Image (cartoon, rainbow, N blue to C red):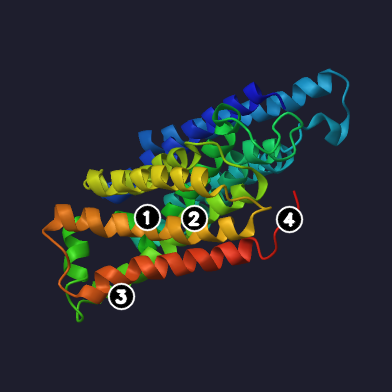
Amino acid sequence: MPPRTDLVTALLGVWFGIGLMIDAWAHSNLTELETFFTPWHAAFYSGFIAISGWIVWQVARNARAGRQGLAAVPDGYLAGLLAIPAFGAFGVADMLWHTFLGIETTVDILFSPSHLGLLATMVLIITTPLRSAWNAPDIGDRPSLGRLLPTLLGLSFAVTLVALLMTYGNAMQYGARGIVEAFSSLDNPRTTRLAASMVITNVYLLAPVLFLLRRWELPFGSVTVMSAVAILMPGAMTGFDEPFLLAGFVVSGLVADLLIRWLRPSAARRGAYWAFAGLSAFVTWSMFIAVASFTGGGLPTVAELWTGPPIVAGLVGLALGVLFLPNARRA
């Protein structure tokens, strides 16, 4: 597809994703919700209608041009097209679920079968620009930031869906004081929960970047864009109560971009790829501890609990790098 078409698809995906964030905020903060028909659901489902209409129109336009069957579906758009009716079916199921079983407002929202179906099909729809760009003849191995932007937006909003699904293991939703308190005690049950959340969050933030680096030499600013999008869902869920902590992830994305420029990790440079995976994870979670300490009342009192987690993150990042790229690909 032409880059402009993918950009429109990505921007409609942004509408879709932000609609979900608004709805997630309402479920988390408005306990009086009693019906499926709310402004928050309207924001979410209107985004679905917009991006679905756009994808279907692309297929219809190709069909009018004489393409038959699957040939009318643009490259990379088939999975998104098939996910549209599936999403609609899960939407109906969600309406029936809420009508007869009530509105979830706590952790049960993350395990509702209709919600899980909506999220899975939504991922397929909003990552359409990624699949479209993967083998696009004009993109090459060193795309510009503008050419790769639809891909970055689609994949980043998919990460926000994972962040929503893993709310119970999302370190970005912790407050600075809570982080300092958790890592200042060996008896606090939040200590191990926070440590586990950091590992989980580290994986789903880093894995998409490593995935892209297997295919492209990412232009400067790519990880910063992805990080800026990634903080939106936890920010929406917490009312952006911790802006400095969230901004720290964006700064970490900028540092990751600098590491990419310095190390030049790629599928053909396995050592640099592994080094980036470990160092970027270490920087991200060192920044997390540093910002929490600065804004939350000082360093945690248990030294092992503020020095060790960034090292664990770096080792997990290195392990991910080895799994993603066990052997260097020849250029």
Report the amino acid beneath label 2.
Leu
**Labels 2, 3: front one:** 2
The residue at which mark 1 appears reads as 284
Check disc 3 and report the residue beneath it. 192
Q: Are marks 3 and 1 in contact (CB under 8 Å)?
A: no
- Where residue 313 appears, x then y in whole percent? 41, 66
Q: Amino acid at mark 1?
A: Thr
Furthest residue toward front: 262
* Residue at the outermost left position: 297
Q: Are marks 4 and 3 in contact (CB under 8 Å)?
A: no
Which disc number belongs to residue 28?
Answer: none
* SS type, badge 2: helix
Looking at the image, tell me whether mark 2 or mark 3 is earlier in sequence order. 3
* 122 relative to 200 in the view: left or right: right
From the image, state whether disc 4 or disc 3 is nearer to you: 4
| Cβ atoms at labels 1 and 2 below 8 Å apart | yes
Q: Earlier in the sequence, mark 4 or mark 3?
A: 3
Depicted 198 relative to depicted 41: above or below: below
Q: Residues within 10 Å of mark 3 (few under 14, many from 20)?
A: some
Query: From mark 3 to mark 1, how far is it between C-alphas?
Result: 19 Å
In the image, 132 versus 69, the foreground residue is: 132
**Residue bearing mark 2:** 206
